[in-house]
Amino acid sequence: MYNETSDRSELSRRDFLARMSGLPLVAGVGGDWIGKLYEGLPLPLPLKDEFEIKGTFINAAYTHPMSKGSRAAIHRFLDERMQNGLAPGYDMGQDRKTCIGLFSRLMNVEPGELAWIPSTMVGENHILNALSIPGSKSRVVTDAFHFEGSLYLYGELAKQGLDVEVLRPKGIGIDLEHLERAVTPGTKLVAISSVSSVNGFAHDIKEVCRIAHAKGALVYVDMIQSAGAVPMDLHDSGVDFAACATYKWLMGDFGVGFLYVRKDRLQLLKRVQHGYRQIKSFSSHAFPFEPAGATLFDEEPQYSTGGYFEVGTLGNEGVAGLQYSLALLDRIGVHTIHEHRMPLIERLQEELPKMGFLPMTPKGAVSPIVSFAYDNADKILKPKLDKAGVNIQCYPHRVRISPSFYNDMNDMETLIKALR
Protein backbone atom coordinates (compact mmCIF):
# COMPACT_ATOMS: atom_id res chain seq x y z
CA MET A 1 0.00 0.00 0.00
CA TYR A 2 2.78 2.39 0.87
CA ASN A 3 6.00 2.51 -1.14
CA GLU A 4 8.82 3.44 1.19
CA THR A 5 12.28 4.08 -0.27
CA SER A 6 13.96 0.65 -0.17
CA ASP A 7 17.32 1.93 1.04
CA ARG A 8 16.99 5.54 2.11
CA SER A 9 20.56 5.59 3.43
CA GLU A 10 21.79 5.36 -0.18
CA LEU A 11 19.67 8.29 -1.32
CA SER A 12 21.95 11.22 -2.05
CA ARG A 13 21.03 14.84 -1.51
CA ARG A 14 21.03 15.50 -5.26
CA ASP A 15 18.91 12.41 -6.00
CA PHE A 16 16.36 13.35 -3.40
CA LEU A 17 16.05 16.96 -4.50
CA ALA A 18 15.59 15.77 -8.08
CA ARG A 19 12.70 13.57 -6.93
CA MET A 20 10.92 16.25 -4.89
CA SER A 21 8.04 16.57 -7.33
CA GLY A 22 10.21 18.62 -9.67
CA LEU A 23 9.75 21.71 -7.52
CA PRO A 24 12.33 24.48 -7.92
CA LEU A 25 13.94 25.42 -4.62
CA VAL A 26 14.88 28.98 -3.77
CA ALA A 27 17.63 30.25 -1.53
CA GLY A 28 17.07 30.34 2.22
CA VAL A 29 14.70 28.04 4.07
CA GLY A 30 12.98 27.01 0.86
CA GLY A 31 16.19 25.73 -0.73
CA ASP A 32 19.41 25.62 1.26
CA TRP A 33 17.80 24.38 4.46
CA ILE A 34 15.85 21.57 2.84
CA GLY A 35 18.94 20.63 0.87
CA LYS A 36 21.08 20.52 4.02
CA LEU A 37 18.40 18.45 5.73
CA TYR A 38 19.30 15.61 3.37
CA GLU A 39 23.05 15.70 3.95
CA GLY A 40 24.65 13.27 6.35
CA LEU A 41 22.27 10.33 5.98
CA PRO A 42 21.23 8.21 7.85
CA LEU A 43 19.28 9.88 10.64
CA PRO A 44 18.93 7.64 13.73
CA LEU A 45 15.95 7.80 16.06
CA PRO A 46 15.03 9.05 18.62
CA LEU A 47 15.65 12.54 17.31
CA LYS A 48 15.67 14.42 20.61
CA ASP A 49 18.08 17.18 19.56
CA GLU A 50 15.62 18.47 16.95
CA PHE A 51 13.26 19.59 19.72
CA GLU A 52 13.38 21.61 22.93
CA ILE A 53 10.93 19.73 25.12
CA LYS A 54 10.51 20.33 28.83
CA GLY A 55 10.03 17.16 30.85
CA THR A 56 8.67 13.95 29.37
CA PHE A 57 6.15 14.73 26.63
CA ILE A 58 4.21 11.72 25.30
CA ASN A 59 1.18 13.62 24.04
CA ALA A 60 1.82 14.25 20.34
CA ALA A 61 -1.76 13.26 19.44
CA TYR A 62 -2.84 16.40 21.29
CA THR A 63 -0.30 18.79 19.79
CA HIS A 64 3.03 17.70 18.36
CA PRO A 65 5.99 19.85 19.47
CA MET A 66 7.38 22.10 16.77
CA SER A 67 10.96 21.43 15.72
CA LYS A 68 13.87 23.85 16.00
CA GLY A 69 14.09 23.86 12.20
CA SER A 70 10.46 24.91 11.84
CA ARG A 71 10.95 27.66 14.39
CA ALA A 72 13.93 28.96 12.40
CA ALA A 73 11.93 28.78 9.17
CA ILE A 74 9.15 30.84 10.72
CA HIS A 75 11.74 33.31 11.97
CA ARG A 76 12.94 33.76 8.40
CA PHE A 77 9.37 34.35 7.29
CA LEU A 78 9.03 37.02 10.00
CA ASP A 79 12.24 38.65 8.79
CA GLU A 80 10.59 39.01 5.39
CA ARG A 81 7.40 40.37 6.91
CA MET A 82 9.38 42.89 8.93
CA GLN A 83 11.13 44.04 5.72
CA ASN A 84 14.40 44.29 7.65
CA GLY A 85 16.60 43.04 4.83
CA LEU A 86 17.51 39.76 6.56
CA ALA A 87 15.57 37.50 4.18
CA PRO A 88 16.69 38.39 0.64
CA GLY A 89 14.92 36.44 -2.08
CA TYR A 90 12.35 34.92 0.25
CA ASP A 91 9.27 33.61 -1.60
CA MET A 92 6.03 32.77 0.24
CA GLY A 93 4.58 31.22 -2.90
CA GLN A 94 7.51 28.82 -3.10
CA ASP A 95 6.86 27.74 0.49
CA ARG A 96 3.33 26.76 -0.50
CA LYS A 97 4.44 24.90 -3.64
CA THR A 98 7.11 22.97 -1.77
CA CYS A 99 4.66 21.98 0.99
CA ILE A 100 2.06 20.80 -1.51
CA GLY A 101 4.73 18.79 -3.32
CA LEU A 102 6.00 17.16 -0.14
CA PHE A 103 2.54 16.38 1.22
CA SER A 104 1.34 14.96 -2.09
CA ARG A 105 4.41 12.69 -2.08
CA LEU A 106 3.73 11.66 1.51
CA MET A 107 0.10 10.69 0.79
CA ASN A 108 0.59 9.47 -2.81
CA VAL A 109 -1.78 11.99 -4.40
CA GLU A 110 -1.44 14.60 -7.13
CA PRO A 111 -0.70 18.21 -6.11
CA GLY A 112 -3.86 19.38 -7.89
CA GLU A 113 -5.96 17.15 -5.65
CA LEU A 114 -5.00 19.22 -2.58
CA ALA A 115 -6.30 22.50 -1.20
CA TRP A 116 -5.18 24.60 1.75
CA ILE A 117 -7.67 24.78 4.61
CA PRO A 118 -7.44 26.22 8.15
CA SER A 119 -8.62 23.09 9.99
CA THR A 120 -9.89 19.54 9.62
CA MET A 121 -13.43 20.49 10.55
CA VAL A 122 -13.48 23.22 7.93
CA GLY A 123 -12.52 20.58 5.37
CA GLU A 124 -15.34 18.26 6.44
CA ASN A 125 -17.84 21.12 6.29
CA HIS A 126 -16.55 22.05 2.82
CA ILE A 127 -17.25 18.54 1.55
CA LEU A 128 -20.72 18.36 3.08
CA ASN A 129 -21.68 21.72 1.61
CA ALA A 130 -20.25 20.89 -1.81
CA LEU A 131 -22.30 17.67 -1.82
CA SER A 132 -25.45 19.65 -0.83
CA ILE A 133 -25.90 17.52 2.28
CA PRO A 134 -26.91 20.20 4.85
CA GLY A 135 -30.66 20.76 4.74
CA SER A 136 -31.25 17.58 2.74
CA LYS A 137 -32.72 14.24 3.76
CA SER A 138 -29.73 12.31 2.48
CA ARG A 139 -28.32 9.39 4.46
CA VAL A 140 -24.91 9.60 6.16
CA VAL A 141 -23.24 6.79 8.10
CA THR A 142 -20.57 7.50 10.71
CA ASP A 143 -19.43 5.89 13.97
CA ALA A 144 -18.80 6.68 17.63
CA PHE A 145 -15.02 6.75 17.05
CA HIS A 146 -15.30 9.72 14.70
CA PHE A 147 -14.14 13.10 16.05
CA GLU A 148 -16.53 14.60 18.60
CA GLY A 149 -16.81 17.86 16.64
CA SER A 150 -17.90 15.85 13.60
CA LEU A 151 -20.46 13.91 15.62
CA TYR A 152 -21.85 17.24 16.82
CA LEU A 153 -21.98 18.43 13.19
CA TYR A 154 -24.00 15.40 12.04
CA GLY A 155 -26.23 15.62 15.10
CA GLU A 156 -27.14 19.20 14.23
CA LEU A 157 -27.78 18.28 10.59
CA ALA A 158 -29.98 15.40 11.76
CA LYS A 159 -32.18 17.98 13.50
CA GLN A 160 -32.66 19.55 10.04
CA GLY A 161 -33.80 16.27 8.49
CA LEU A 162 -30.56 14.47 7.59
CA ASP A 163 -30.76 10.68 7.98
CA VAL A 164 -27.73 9.94 10.18
CA GLU A 165 -26.71 6.58 11.62
CA VAL A 166 -23.89 6.54 14.19
CA LEU A 167 -22.50 3.03 14.60
CA ARG A 168 -21.85 1.92 18.17
CA PRO A 169 -18.49 0.39 19.10
CA LYS A 170 -18.17 -3.37 19.15
CA GLY A 171 -15.58 -3.89 21.86
CA ILE A 172 -12.76 -1.49 21.00
CA GLY A 173 -13.55 -1.09 17.32
CA ILE A 174 -16.21 -0.94 14.62
CA ASP A 175 -17.47 -4.16 13.07
CA LEU A 176 -17.27 -4.09 9.27
CA GLU A 177 -20.35 -6.30 8.91
CA HIS A 178 -22.29 -3.76 10.97
CA LEU A 179 -20.98 -1.01 8.70
CA GLU A 180 -21.96 -2.93 5.58
CA ARG A 181 -25.53 -3.37 6.86
CA ALA A 182 -25.74 0.34 7.72
CA VAL A 183 -24.63 1.51 4.26
CA THR A 184 -27.92 0.91 2.54
CA PRO A 185 -28.58 1.73 -1.12
CA GLY A 186 -29.01 5.49 -1.40
CA THR A 187 -26.50 6.30 1.33
CA LYS A 188 -24.64 9.41 0.18
CA LEU A 189 -21.63 9.53 2.50
CA VAL A 190 -19.66 7.42 4.94
CA ALA A 191 -17.67 9.72 7.27
CA ILE A 192 -15.00 8.27 9.54
CA SER A 193 -11.69 8.99 11.23
CA SER A 194 -8.84 6.90 9.87
CA VAL A 195 -7.40 6.69 13.40
CA SER A 196 -9.68 7.45 16.32
CA SER A 197 -8.56 10.12 18.76
CA VAL A 198 -10.37 8.17 21.49
CA ASN A 199 -8.35 4.97 21.51
CA GLY A 200 -6.34 4.78 18.30
CA PHE A 201 -8.75 2.36 16.61
CA ALA A 202 -7.75 2.31 12.93
CA HIS A 203 -10.27 1.58 10.21
CA ASP A 204 -9.36 -0.62 7.27
CA ILE A 205 -9.86 2.31 4.91
CA LYS A 206 -9.58 0.27 1.75
CA GLU A 207 -12.30 -2.12 2.94
CA VAL A 208 -14.54 0.74 4.08
CA CYS A 209 -14.23 2.29 0.61
CA ARG A 210 -15.01 -1.06 -1.06
CA ILE A 211 -18.18 -1.43 1.02
CA ALA A 212 -19.31 2.16 0.45
CA HIS A 213 -18.55 2.32 -3.26
CA ALA A 214 -20.33 -0.99 -3.90
CA LYS A 215 -23.52 0.70 -2.70
CA GLY A 216 -22.96 4.03 -4.41
CA ALA A 217 -21.78 5.94 -1.34
CA LEU A 218 -18.77 8.24 -1.09
CA VAL A 219 -16.18 8.19 1.71
CA TYR A 220 -14.79 11.09 3.73
CA VAL A 221 -11.84 10.45 6.07
CA ASP A 222 -10.58 12.64 8.91
CA MET A 223 -6.87 11.79 8.77
CA ILE A 224 -5.49 14.17 11.40
CA GLN A 225 -4.35 11.30 13.66
CA SER A 226 -2.75 9.32 10.85
CA ALA A 227 -1.15 11.75 8.37
CA GLY A 228 2.55 11.79 9.21
CA ALA A 229 2.15 9.10 11.89
CA VAL A 230 1.35 5.93 9.95
CA PRO A 231 1.98 5.04 6.29
CA MET A 232 -0.93 6.15 4.11
CA ASP A 233 -1.65 5.84 0.39
CA LEU A 234 -4.83 7.75 -0.39
CA HIS A 235 -4.95 6.71 -4.06
CA ASP A 236 -4.58 3.02 -3.25
CA SER A 237 -7.17 3.20 -0.47
CA GLY A 238 -9.86 4.58 -2.77
CA VAL A 239 -10.78 7.46 -0.44
CA ASP A 240 -12.90 10.14 -2.10
CA PHE A 241 -12.27 13.00 0.32
CA ALA A 242 -9.92 13.51 3.28
CA ALA A 243 -8.75 16.37 5.46
CA CYS A 244 -6.31 17.15 8.23
CA ALA A 245 -4.80 20.03 10.13
CA THR A 246 -1.01 20.02 10.48
CA TYR A 247 -0.34 20.77 14.16
CA LYS A 248 -0.34 17.10 15.19
CA TRP A 249 1.85 14.49 13.47
CA LEU A 250 2.82 16.77 10.58
CA MET A 251 4.50 19.06 13.15
CA GLY A 252 3.01 22.23 11.67
CA ASP A 253 1.04 24.97 13.40
CA PHE A 254 -2.58 25.90 14.01
CA GLY A 255 -4.61 27.36 11.14
CA VAL A 256 -2.90 25.34 8.37
CA GLY A 257 -4.24 22.10 6.89
CA PHE A 258 -4.94 20.11 3.74
CA LEU A 259 -8.12 18.99 1.99
CA TYR A 260 -7.89 16.11 -0.49
CA VAL A 261 -10.46 15.48 -3.23
CA ARG A 262 -9.88 12.66 -5.69
CA LYS A 263 -9.72 14.39 -9.04
CA ASP A 264 -12.54 12.38 -10.63
CA ARG A 265 -14.83 13.43 -7.76
CA LEU A 266 -14.64 17.17 -8.42
CA GLN A 267 -17.41 16.82 -11.00
CA LEU A 268 -19.74 15.69 -8.19
CA LEU A 269 -19.17 18.86 -6.18
CA LYS A 270 -20.61 22.33 -6.51
CA ARG A 271 -18.63 25.47 -5.77
CA VAL A 272 -20.10 26.86 -2.59
CA GLN A 273 -17.68 29.74 -2.06
CA HIS A 274 -15.75 31.96 -4.41
CA GLY A 275 -12.65 34.10 -4.09
CA TYR A 276 -9.29 35.28 -5.31
CA ARG A 277 -7.34 32.02 -4.98
CA GLN A 278 -9.80 30.20 -7.24
CA ILE A 279 -8.99 32.36 -10.26
CA LYS A 280 -6.98 30.84 -13.10
CA SER A 281 -7.05 33.99 -15.24
CA PHE A 282 -8.60 37.44 -14.94
CA SER A 283 -8.79 40.21 -17.58
CA SER A 284 -10.11 43.70 -17.01
CA HIS A 285 -11.70 45.92 -19.68
CA ALA A 286 -12.74 48.75 -17.38
CA PHE A 287 -9.70 51.02 -17.05
CA PRO A 288 -7.40 53.11 -19.29
CA PHE A 289 -5.17 51.27 -21.79
CA GLU A 290 -6.90 47.94 -21.17
CA PRO A 291 -8.23 45.98 -24.19
CA ALA A 292 -11.89 46.42 -25.07
CA GLY A 293 -14.29 43.66 -24.22
CA ALA A 294 -17.97 42.83 -24.25
CA THR A 295 -17.92 42.72 -20.45
CA LEU A 296 -16.06 44.72 -17.82
CA PHE A 297 -14.18 41.62 -16.68
CA ASP A 298 -13.38 38.16 -18.02
CA GLU A 299 -12.37 35.44 -15.61
CA GLU A 300 -11.70 31.71 -15.64
CA PRO A 301 -11.74 29.52 -12.51
CA GLN A 302 -9.23 26.81 -11.73
CA TYR A 303 -10.40 23.22 -12.03
CA SER A 304 -8.61 21.68 -9.07
CA THR A 305 -9.29 21.06 -5.39
CA GLY A 306 -7.68 24.40 -4.56
CA GLY A 307 -9.78 26.01 -7.27
CA TYR A 308 -12.93 24.77 -5.57
CA PHE A 309 -12.17 25.46 -1.94
CA GLU A 310 -9.46 28.08 -1.45
CA VAL A 311 -10.72 31.64 -1.21
CA GLY A 312 -8.25 34.20 0.08
CA THR A 313 -5.21 34.80 2.24
CA LEU A 314 -3.44 31.80 3.77
CA GLY A 315 -1.61 31.39 7.08
CA ASN A 316 1.80 31.75 5.46
CA GLU A 317 3.68 31.82 8.75
CA GLY A 318 2.49 28.30 9.49
CA VAL A 319 3.27 27.22 5.94
CA ALA A 320 6.87 28.34 6.35
CA GLY A 321 7.34 26.13 9.40
CA LEU A 322 5.42 23.25 7.83
CA GLN A 323 7.81 23.18 4.87
CA TYR A 324 10.67 22.17 7.14
CA SER A 325 8.52 19.63 9.04
CA LEU A 326 7.33 17.88 5.88
CA ALA A 327 10.89 17.68 4.58
CA LEU A 328 11.97 16.21 7.91
CA LEU A 329 9.21 13.59 7.74
CA ASP A 330 10.21 12.72 4.21
CA ARG A 331 13.84 12.46 5.25
CA ILE A 332 13.10 10.07 8.13
CA GLY A 333 10.26 8.15 6.49
CA VAL A 334 6.87 7.58 8.11
CA HIS A 335 7.42 3.83 8.01
CA THR A 336 10.63 4.28 10.03
CA ILE A 337 8.79 6.44 12.58
CA HIS A 338 6.06 3.80 12.85
CA GLU A 339 8.61 1.03 13.47
CA HIS A 340 10.39 3.14 16.10
CA ARG A 341 7.16 3.83 17.99
CA MET A 342 5.70 0.29 18.09
CA PRO A 343 8.01 -1.16 20.80
CA LEU A 344 7.26 1.88 22.98
CA ILE A 345 3.52 1.26 22.74
CA GLU A 346 3.97 -2.48 23.22
CA ARG A 347 5.86 -1.80 26.46
CA LEU A 348 2.91 0.23 27.78
CA GLN A 349 0.42 -2.43 26.69
CA GLU A 350 2.46 -5.01 28.55
CA GLU A 351 2.92 -3.12 31.82
CA LEU A 352 -0.09 -0.84 32.42
CA PRO A 353 -2.74 -3.60 32.59
CA LYS A 354 -0.75 -5.05 35.53
CA MET A 355 -1.35 -1.74 37.31
CA GLY A 356 -5.13 -1.74 36.90
CA PHE A 357 -5.42 0.04 33.54
CA LEU A 358 -8.08 -1.39 31.22
CA PRO A 359 -6.80 -1.62 27.60
CA MET A 360 -8.83 0.27 25.01
CA THR A 361 -6.46 -0.16 22.05
CA PRO A 362 -5.95 -3.52 20.32
CA LYS A 363 -2.44 -4.94 20.47
CA GLY A 364 -0.56 -4.70 17.18
CA ALA A 365 -2.63 -1.72 15.98
CA VAL A 366 -0.88 0.59 13.52
CA SER A 367 -2.09 3.59 15.49
CA PRO A 368 0.27 6.14 17.11
CA ILE A 369 -2.17 6.21 20.05
CA VAL A 370 -2.67 3.82 22.95
CA SER A 371 -5.50 4.38 25.45
CA PHE A 372 -6.46 2.84 28.77
CA ALA A 373 -9.63 3.21 30.84
CA TYR A 374 -9.07 4.25 34.45
CA ASP A 375 -11.76 5.47 36.82
CA ASN A 376 -11.29 9.13 37.81
CA ALA A 377 -8.07 9.27 35.80
CA ASP A 378 -7.87 13.05 35.68
CA LYS A 379 -8.33 13.47 39.44
CA ILE A 380 -6.15 10.57 40.57
CA LEU A 381 -3.39 10.42 37.97
CA LYS A 382 -2.85 13.94 36.66
CA PRO A 383 -1.41 15.35 39.92
CA LYS A 384 1.11 12.49 40.02
CA LEU A 385 2.05 13.03 36.37
CA ASP A 386 2.43 16.78 36.82
CA LYS A 387 4.73 16.20 39.78
CA ALA A 388 6.90 13.85 37.71
CA GLY A 389 6.97 16.26 34.74
CA VAL A 390 5.17 13.77 32.47
CA ASN A 391 2.64 15.00 29.91
CA ILE A 392 0.02 12.59 28.57
CA GLN A 393 -3.67 13.21 27.90
CA CYS A 394 -5.86 12.59 30.96
CA TYR A 395 -9.64 12.42 30.59
CA PRO A 396 -12.17 11.84 33.38
CA HIS A 397 -12.04 8.06 32.95
CA ARG A 398 -9.23 7.24 30.54
CA VAL A 399 -5.69 8.18 29.56
CA ARG A 400 -4.30 8.55 26.05
CA ILE A 401 -0.58 8.16 25.37
CA SER A 402 0.95 9.06 22.02
CA PRO A 403 4.74 8.77 21.60
CA SER A 404 6.60 10.24 18.64
CA PHE A 405 10.07 9.85 17.17
CA TYR A 406 11.70 12.03 19.85
CA ASN A 407 10.59 9.56 22.55
CA ASP A 408 12.53 6.47 23.67
CA MET A 409 12.10 3.57 26.08
CA ASN A 410 13.43 5.66 28.95
CA ASP A 411 10.41 7.98 28.49
CA MET A 412 8.08 4.99 28.75
CA GLU A 413 9.76 3.83 31.96
CA THR A 414 9.47 7.35 33.40
CA LEU A 415 5.73 7.28 32.65
CA ILE A 416 5.28 3.81 34.13
CA LYS A 417 7.10 4.84 37.29
CA ALA A 418 4.94 7.96 37.64
CA LEU A 419 1.73 5.95 37.20
CA ARG A 420 2.83 3.23 39.57
Image (spheres, grey):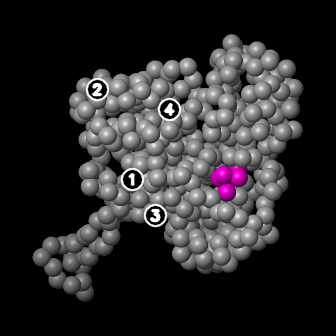
Quadrant containing the C terminus is top right
Asked whether the viewer can see residue 166, the reply is: yes
Residue 194 image offset from top left, x and y in percent: 51, 39
Q: CA distance from mark 4 to mark 1?
A: 20 Å
Residue numbers of the magenta segment: 333-337
Q: Which residue is mark 3?
A: 111
**Circle 3: residue type:** Pro
Q: Earlier in the sequence, mark 1 or mark 2?
A: 2
Q: Which residue is mark 1?
A: 261
**Circle 4: residue type:** Phe
Q: Which residue is mark 2?
A: 163
Residue at the left extreme of this rendering: 294
Q: CA distance from mark 3 to mark 2?
A: 34 Å
Disc 2 crowd, CA 10 A, few/some/many (<14, 14-19, 20+): some
Residue 75 image offset from top left, x and y in percent: 68, 62
Residue at (32% x, 40% y) in the render: 214
**Circle 1: residue type:** Val
Res. 147 mark: 4
Q: Nearer the viewer, residue 389 or 201?
A: 201
**Circle 2: residue type:** Asp
Q: CA distance from mark 4 to mark 3?
A: 26 Å
Asked whether the viewer can see residue 82, the reply is: no
Residue 261 sits above or below residue 366 on the image: below
Residue at (46% x, 64% y) in the render: 111
Q: Earlier in the sequence, mark 1 or mark 3?
A: 3
Residue 409 relative to residue 98: left or right: right
Say if mark 3 contacts mark 2, CB within 8 Å: no
Residue at (58% x, 44% y) in the render: 226
